[in-house]
Image (spheres, coloured by chain):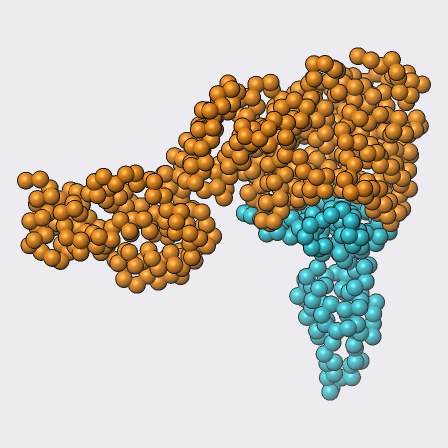
Amino acid sequence: MGPYDSSTSSSAISSSPSSSTSSSSSSSSCAGKSPDQIDGLLAGAGYRVRSSELRHVAQRLEHLETVMVNAPSQISHLGNDVVHHNPSDLGTWVDSLLSDLNPPEYSDLRYDDFGPILDPSTITRAWTEHLIPEQQRIIPQHLSVATEMEEDSSIRLVHVLMTCAECVQGGEFSLACSLIDEMQHLLTRVNVGCGIGKVAGYFVDALSRRLFTPQGVALVGSTIENEILYNHFYEASPYLKFAHFTANQAILEGFDGHDCVHVIDFNLMHGLQWPALIQALALRPGGPPVLRLTGIGPPSPDGRDSLREIGVRLTELARSVNVRFAFQGVTASRLEDVKPLMLQVDPKEAVAINSIMQLHRLLVSDPTRTSPINNVLDWIRNLNPKIMTVVEQEVDHNQPEFLARFTEALYYYSTMFDSLETCSAQFEKAFAEMYIQKEICNVVCCEGSVRVERHEPLAKWRARLNGAGFKPLHLGSNSFKQASMLLTLFSAEGYCVEENDGCLTLGWHSRPLIAASAWKAVSEPNPSLGLISHPNNVL
Amino acid sequence: MVQLLEIGLANVELNLVSDKEKRLKFCINDHMDILIEILQRLDGRSLGSAACVCRLWQHITQSDMLWEHLCFHHVSPRLPSGVRPVVAALGGYRRLYMLCLRPVLSRLGLARQLSGGGGHQEVVRRVWTRHLVELSLSLFCVDYYERLGSGGGGGGRVGDASASSLMFLCKPVNV
């Protein structure tokens, strides 16, 4: 006698739930029972579910799981103050939970997971076997547990991402497209609100942009949009603050003893770095110097002179604290378009160059002409600055092969997104993520001169700057202490400041993400040639 | 010590006249210098409570000198005299305390407690003090600059004008 036969015979005998039926038949054998029969296996666990409702309950439970995983904050109350009446009636219980949570859509149940329904008994058997450990996990005590299914999907997602990147590098576009489809599907199975799901989402988006949008179309926003995103990134995370404060400390120390000083900022934005320097100069022993600030920035589209507006604000601040201050703005859409004459450097003043994540944009390698980085470093050296502060991302996104770049970017931005999770202001965090997303898109989607985010690690910058005639200045212990103190003010415990042979790096859980260093020109060039642009300085 | 001072003040305010001995009626409000001396020794929270006592006390506690004393009296090498006009220009000592020093000190105090340095708080605080002062002043200056910007409506800031880069100080520590 097969299993179905035995259950048929037993169901004929008793019409009420009996656990003996469940122990005697290993399969749920619902096909053999009458639809009103209470399912035997579940009855053994203490739940009363009708066989006819099993599939429905299974779907509802899976739906509940999706909702809980995707929005754990909504269900925290479930762990505390929900009273379940008649919990053995599993179907009603799940329904009441779901109606409490007001799930967004019933339709996002994944019917395709069930596959073609050939044999109802096998399907329901698989579900009930799956169901019992599932329902124990769903009981709301520990709501942040990722299910096994989700973990598997995440791992698979990373693998598929790598494979897809390899295909893109190899030029196999049709395979890459099908992999993208698979990843979109996988993304529905993971939690895209945080963790690997979120990062993977951005990278899948970037890959599909690379495949489907015409080459050379970068995700370039308007200047105003970029400024807004930059501001929110400044507020949401300590990276830019660390950059500003460390650079300011180095500049302050470099200007020691000088009475006429000139700071050249390669990317002014809103000038958030300079109030702190102005205040520190105001309070330095011996009184403040005469400060000039030259801010370089892109032209604003609507004709506003945004650089001048920032200059006015900074001037007002400087006047409040009694620092003699002058500002000039230099408009240039690319740093290599700036000529040293525009900066109007006076030979008697001490010059500081400040570059926060700007030098890597000059690394665009065009075989037809000399790399702009060498030109720029040359005229910087000819200005003979007392100090040049360089802050750059600590990662190698300038490798020629796409796959290597992609892999580096995946790990780097995962760490960065991880660190952003600690930001409690959702508004700031969302905009900061958009800021990072633009970087990701540039690294992944763009090639040639459009790809400006050519980050290089500190070791490479050291080699490059040493070769261009600069020598490193050690950032002192004051910078380190200030950076450490700044970090303790941030609410997350994962940030770490490290000293790396005179340079400071800020990282998340021992992965450095941003590196700050200071440099000085090595041999003094002939002062009379220093400021006149040489026509014969051709490489 | 604060409680003793508060009790002392309270006692002084109640006009305790014994019928046996003639005592002078003593009202602290008639002796502003003593009142200020006492208020100078209070901590920030008590100073805030004192501001709620009466209009006269509120007026006195708004004087920046009290808050200057609160902010920097424990700084061991005395701050240069140039600090006062700078802080005054940037918004005053009371604002500096409320916005920067108090959250910074509490965040650092908590951080130190977590790392197990509870008993050595005073000593450790003095070692960090110079950096603390400099950092607080820098953050204060950034706040002033942002207020300048939002007041002028320039720069395209999204969100309300009171949002500033110092908001991260006010957020609870995620332990």
Looking at the image, residue A325 lies above or below residue A87:
above
* Quadrant of the rendering where the N terminus of chain B is positioned: bottom right
Q: Is residue B163 left or right of residue A138?
A: right
Q: Is residue A472 left or right of residue A192?
A: right
Find residue A123 and report its horizontal and vertical position in percent: 24, 41
Chain rendered cyan: B
Looking at the image, residue B51 lies above or below residue A430:
below
Give the residue at x 77% y 39%. Answer: A300
Please name whichever residue, B120 or A301, is drawn nearer the observer in this view of the structure: A301
Looking at the image, residue B82 lies above or below residue A396:
below
Give the residue at x 70% y 59%. Answer: B44
Give the residue at x 17% y 50%. Answer: A40
Q: Is residue B76 visible?
A: no
Find residue A262 and report its horizontal and vertical position in percent: 87, 33
Give the residue at x 59% y 52%. Answer: B172
Find residue A25 and report its horizontal and vertical position in percent: 13, 44
Please name whichever residue, B122 or A279, is drawn nearer the observer in this view of the structure: A279
Find residue A66 and report its horizontal and vertical position in percent: 40, 47
Q: Place residue A146 in its image quadrant.
A: top left
Please name whichever residue, B44 or A534, is drawn nearer the observer in this view of the structure: A534
Looking at the image, residue A422 lies above or below residue A368:
below
- Rendered colour, chain A: orange
Q: How many marks?
A: 0
Q: Place residue A82 in its image quadrant.
A: bottom left
Q: Is residue A330 visible?
A: yes
Q: Place residue A484 in its image quadrant.
A: top right
Q: Is residue B97 left or right of residue A103?
A: right
